[in-house]
Image (cartoon, helix red, strand yellow):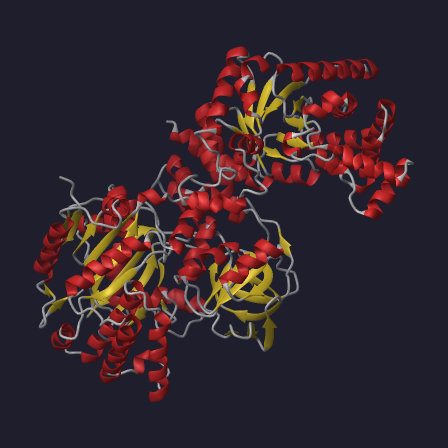
Amino acid sequence: MTKWVYGFGGGSAEGRSDMRELLGGKGANLAEMSNLGLPVPPGFTITTEVCTAFYDNDRAYPDGLDSEVEGALAAIEKLVGRKFGDAKDPLLVSVRSGARASMPGMMDTVLNLGLNDETVEGLASVSGDRRFAYDSYRRFIQMYGDVVLGVDHYHFEEILEIHKEDKGYSLDTEMGADDWAEVVGQFKKKVQSELDAPFPQDPREQLWGAIGAVFGSWMNARANTYRRLHNIPASWGTAVNVQAMVFGNMGDDCATGVCFSRNPSTGENRFYGEYLINAQGEDVVAGIRTPAPLTKIEREESGSDLTSMEEALPGVFGELCDIRDKLESHYRDMQDMEFTVESGKLYMLQTRAGKRTAKAALRIAVEMCRDGVISQEDALRRVDPAQLDQLLHPTLDPDAERKVVGMGLPASPGAASGQIVFSAESAEEWVSNKGRKVILVRIETSPEDIAGMHAAEGILTSRGGMTSHAAVVARGMGTPCVCGAGSIKIDYANKTMVSGGVTLKEGDVITLDGSTGEVMLGEVATLKPDLSGDFSQLMEWADGVRRLKVRTNAETPDDAETARGFGAEGIGLCRTEHMFFDPARIISMREMILAETEQGRRTALDKLLPYQRQDFIDLFRIMKGLPVTIRLLDPPLHEFLPHGDAEIAEVANAAGVSEAIVKRRLLDLAEANPMLGHRGCRLGISYPEIYEMQARAIFEAAIEVSKDGGDPVIPEIMIPLIVGKKELEILKAAIIKVAADVETEKSAKLNFLVGTMIELPRAALRAGEIAEEAEFFSFGTNDLTQTTFGLSRDDASRFLDTYIAKDIFAGDPFVSLDQDGVGELVGLAAERGRATRGDIKLGICGEHGGDPASIAFCEAQGLDYVSCSPYRVPIARLAAAQAALGRK
């Protein structure tokens, strides 16, 4: 029979750390800590398989689950010596989610479960602290009411604020036992009025309500958004962890906190974290109270006037340090730990591989390798390639003028400038519809803000610490973030923030420095990143492991220089059409299009030849003998023509024709579906003089650069959009003829390749015969995805989210290659091409060339290279190394 529940505690567990798929990350690590003999409150894990069954069976639980839960609950009772629901000495439990991939703040948690009007008195009696008991009860009603019953938390916050105002209190800690008892009564009345039903008093009803709510939260909007952003499949499900409560809010010898075995922002090998005296865990991560630093040195460096845990609870802090060392040594990775101190006794509630910035990830991986803790291969596997993007962008120029108007905690490094918005919805709308760059400014963020946080350039909050929701999520996204800027006053109603004596309104520009915590007025100049040190070391290790070459998509000297700086090994796609939109060239291009005769077109093309030749000279010199794949003109000609009256008049004048002729030509070239129309090689077949001019420019540039005495230039000329062998045969012959003419004229010998872009399904199917002419295939996976799916990447966004939500698509096929459909065409074309021409060169040049999952596919297919945009070159280098390691 299937086992649905796994117990842990008392120095042993039924699960292990390698059971993440079944127990989720939290459950697997709680089991492992129990097996290591660490002080873990006992509990049990309901497996992810129950979550799957729950959704497969219309939210019904599998047979036998209830009896297994009862048995596991009895085991907890035995270990702690208390009974669940006992009016005199009640066992209370927490109910938490735990997916196999960490999803901080996305799903629901309930603490202090098991309290009711009777058990709260028992808790007061056995603890000797009636205030603590009623504080715990009000927390339970508030959490359970919100998470399980659907009574919005603001109802409870409003009641609490009114009570504090009436009593003249400013802090929750000023509330006494009678205050909390009164608030509890009001909370229950609010539940009754909102639901027309009383707050549930039966602890077992409470327990099953919470379990159902945690499973239900797996499919809530914020969890779905988080999974989509982080490519976490919905099919994984979540586990539910039920654990005996330990209390950090029983007095000044109690505490709760979050800590990291190393600094998650910098990677420095130093204990790091935050804690609160007399609090529960949610108080730390929710940002309601500002936590104190864990260590004395943290306190001194931050200038905090709060007492560190090292100073306030030195004995417990020493125990925590020992556990930190033990867990990092055991897992061989930086750990993110949660703990509670109850009456001077330390309990560990969680450990997991800590989320970290890219800078920290690099430092931790490289240092652990150098220290002999992990191998080079492990170090390469430890860094998420996509995270490297955080390191490749500018930081603030230290010499630039800056007006600092506020200061907070440096929660997630990097610099960001943008216009202020005060809601996640505004952030999404301004970015999507207005094309703006925005800074999301909030008092504190919540999981509901996830989509707006993703859209924003940076995040600023006035509350919360380094482990608050905003900080953790921003670090995971690589978004600059400043938290806990308490001097900044935010007014949502009037859409203003007051900082440093300056009032800023929505739309004003600010700059954040997530590395220092500074908030600045206006936009501040930036500097290029430094990619030496740990970055350089990891890239060196990656280059020693990977088989796939990494090229770049570039057609400007700036892009080519940037890509070379990032380690590109050539150009895999030079889109020549981008070269013709320069104002000095577009007139001649339009002249060519408007010409009525071949001679007229050739006359206009002769004007473009010197520009085109210089373009290639520049690229060849930058690439210094590395391969450069040049795609001949691809888009339909109408894209180069003017549409406004003023531009039409200008073109007509330059071409010496009437405006009527220009307008008629516009009508002639208009196409219902230009994506599938007169473009690519079809232009070369119709107007061979266009491709002849481009080939001449390439060959003359190659000879010119080769004269420099440097590495020989071997251009790769790519014919786009073919459907079969004949098109390539005709155009290749024309290119070879141009080469012969140039060789004669220049008294030089050329070395070059002619190949094609495989971007249509028919070309993939006929790859065997196409390879008779093609010396290389470059898979244009952007267009191959469009033509295989029948999708327009410009319009598909209108319904892609719906398709992904309904599991029709696993993800956006323009972001990560569809390996089942488009991938099968790539694999089939590669196989048939090699069968005809054994030494055929194979690569991809769509944006998938910078996607780690797509790169792994290319490695599996044995392609020779991937090509991607310049800033994704380091990502591709590391992903290619990981793909090679994955095949060992």
Q: Is residue 147 above or below residue 67?
A: below
Q: Which of 45 and 667 is in front in this view?
A: 667
- Quadrant that contains the C terminus: top left
263 relative to 704 in the view: left or right: left
- Residue pictured at 48% horizontal, 70% vertical: 485
Pick the front one: 42 or 193: 193
Look at the picture and state if 122 lies above or below 217: below
Quadrant location of residue 760? top right
- Percent position (x, y) of residue 646? 84, 48
- x and y percentages locating residue 95 in the rendered image: 24, 59
Q: Nearer the viewer, residue 36 or 474?
A: 474
x, y percent for residue 659: 87, 40
Q: Where is residue 391 in the image (x, y as percent from the top left)?
A: 53, 48
Identify the residue shown where x is 87% and y is 26%: 600
Above or below residue 835? Residue 673 is below
Quarter placement of the N terminus = top left
Between 53 and 539, the one nearer to me in the picture: 53
User: Can residue 342 be seen in this snapshot?
Assistant: yes
Residue 168 seen in render? no
Q: Quadrant of residue 683?
A: top right
